[in-house]
Amino acid sequence: MDEQRTEIASLGEFGLIDHLTKNNETMQAGTLLSVGDDAAVIDQFGKQCVVSTDMLIEGIHFDLMYTPLKHLGYKAVAVNLSDICAMNATPTQILMSIGISNRFSLEAIDEFYEGVYAACRRYNVDLVGGDTSSSQKGFIVSITAIGEVSPNEYVTRSGAKKNDLICVSGDLGGAYVGLQLLEREKRIFLENPGVQPELNDKAYIVGRILKPEPRADIVNWLQEKGIKPTSMIDISDGLSSELLHICKQSGVGCVLYEDKIPMHTETREMAFEFQIDPTLCALSGGEDYELLFTIPQEEYEKIVLNEQVSVIGYITDASEGSHLLTRQGNKHPLKAQGWNAFEG
Amino acid sequence: MDEQRTEIASLGEFGLIDHLTKNNETMQAGTLLSVGDDAAVIDQFGKQCVVSTDMLIEGIHFDLMYTPLKHLGYKAVAVNLSDICAMNATPTQILMSIGISNRFSLEAIDEFYEGVYAACRRYNVDLVGGDTSSSQKGFIVSITAIGEVSPNEYVTRSGAKKNDLICVSGDLGGAYVGLQLLEREKRIFLENPGVQPELNDKAYIVGRILKPEPRADIVNWLQEKGIKPTSMIDISDGLSSELLHICKQSGVGCVLYEDKIPMHTETREMAFEFQIDPTLCALSGGEDYELLFTIPQEEYEKIVLNEQVSVIGYITDASEGSHLLTRQGNKHPLKAQGWNAFEG
């Protein structure tokens, strides 16, 4: 099978997905939107159903040394619900498959499920199916989330128009510095097992990486206010990468204002302590699971009323490219430097 | 986290699922059927949507030494579609997540996808989403299948009634002896790498394990003939185990006739060569992905017209237990001895 051998790493994650799905044709009339967005959209006889799936693998996506299993269960559900929210839909059900090595006791699995059920209750979502299996190594979780949306109210990545405002919910970069902190404390602990980590005054950023929340509240608010974004995506890989997805799929460019990027004080302080540029944490850190979306300019009056939403830039013609306007007034091309799942 | 440690293996797969889902309450009015059947059923504004998910892990569910990646892709889709068929529904879409270690080249992944797309085309199903990720070890596939069914035409495991006829599609035991054959040839090859396996005259049973087909044809035929089974399940763990699922969930007993169990000549011959009881292969072998279902007696005249369906027994009161009536006229209690995913 290896007459010619192309390393997966040479394509990168998105290159791989493009390659694997380039010949994917849909046959079902009910398939309204297929591969290439946060979720697929299926017409179910008038109303529309949104589905998305994600896999989390121990050692790749999480480290059980500093991730309590209950948090892992919660997060595994949360990140899937986030994909449904990113379609402007309301999550309704999930299915979950897990693979577990014999290293895990039933008590450990129970803890994991506690987190899963906590997230389901919190977001009014039913766990309706799944599969449990043994694994040769480590813990594997695969979740499919299902949601509903009124006909043609779903929002893709491809509808951003010139002059639209770029908005983001919550604040960014916290998950990244939270992770750096956990990794540092892990190293210290491994070198000096007697030392207990001091994380008490870092509750916000640690919470950002361990227990992200899907922004169902933002989707509800947008619906209440009658605002339909022209495009939307959730931030799993970092603001740059996600904004470039929107630009590419919408065939537009953008200007992003560095000084408008919302950031928590704790995030900023931690970034300085680590001597990392806080803006870089927001642009490339990822795992914040906030919503990035575009709206027509005429919705500005409405959007500013929500303190949980920041306007961070605007959409331009594709020919103008995608840029970051720095505090100093310099213009830098935006680059996708999200965590590459195929590195290392 | 390990103050008390209960080994997962001590519960068995079904015990684990029962344990983990015992407090699972549904909140969505649209959730018509949740955990505990071949698939869940979701009301989508009148019509009904069926969803199911399965995870396959290298070294646990398949051995790439004798499973061509193209076949693996085909089978991974097929077994998920089989769950949808087992609900009396028509598969329409799938989502697929894969985890791959750097041992795999792009060409290898392409082969796998060729199989996936071949199965999608064969069954008129769209691949609408997924996730690709690296894994620390081996190949991991998780598929969620979606199907549609007319309102309340879905069939669960819990509707079998006293005097119903027990029916099965195709023939049984082939996948099990096929696997034994592949395992034997693998051992021979490992001991004498020069020896090429001789599988040409064993195409049927090798095909049964490597390339199972979901019985969408049976579901279509039942619908055409206006036969709605009272209960249905697909045979992944073996006839005994599946029939006991139906009996337990329907609150009934059964009598199964050994001499009525359909078996291919090649299966029987191979079983004799391995000195295994062919009946045991059908009862406990599993992976045949045939449909096991019950119908009211008055449908007998219709069902006998289909050569692909065998009537193999009948449903009794629960108080009479579940039995196999042997060729010699002896009555043995049925036992679930399917492959336990948590053994070894």
Image: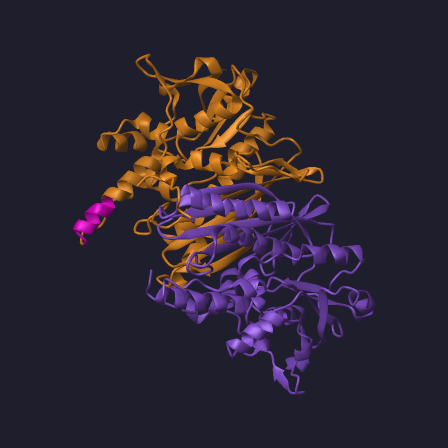
Chain colours: A orange, B purple
- Image coordinates for residue B186, horizontal then vertical, percent: 42, 64
Q: Nearer the viewer, residue B316 or B289?
A: B289
Check the image and report above or below for A46 versus B80: above
Residue B270 against residue A77 in the figure, above or below? below
| Label tally | 0
Q: Quadrant of residue B79?
A: bottom right
Residues in magenta? A185-193
Q: Is residue B344 visible?
A: yes
Quadrant of the snapshot with the C terminus of chain A: top left
Please name whichever residue, A223 or A132, is drawn nearer the observer in this view of the structure: A132
Answer with left or right where residue A311 lies relative to residue A33.
left
Answer above or below: position of B13 versus A120: below
Asked if residue A188 is among those painted magenta in the image, a careful observer would answer: yes
Residue A332 coordinates in the image, percent (x, y)? 34, 17
Query: Residue A147: image x %, image y %?
Result: 59, 41
Q: Visible in this render: residue B336?
A: no
Q: Residue at x 74, y 50 (%)?
A: B150
Magenta segment, principal secondary structure?
helix
The magenta stretch spans residue A320: no
Q: Is residue A45 above or below residue B71?
A: above
Depth check: B78 or B165 in front?
A: B78
Q: Hey, which quadrant is residue A145 in on the image?
A: top right
Using the rendered view, name the quadrant where residue B166 is placed. bottom right
Q: Position of residue A89 (x, y in %)?
A: 58, 36
**Left or right of A212 in this view: A328:** left
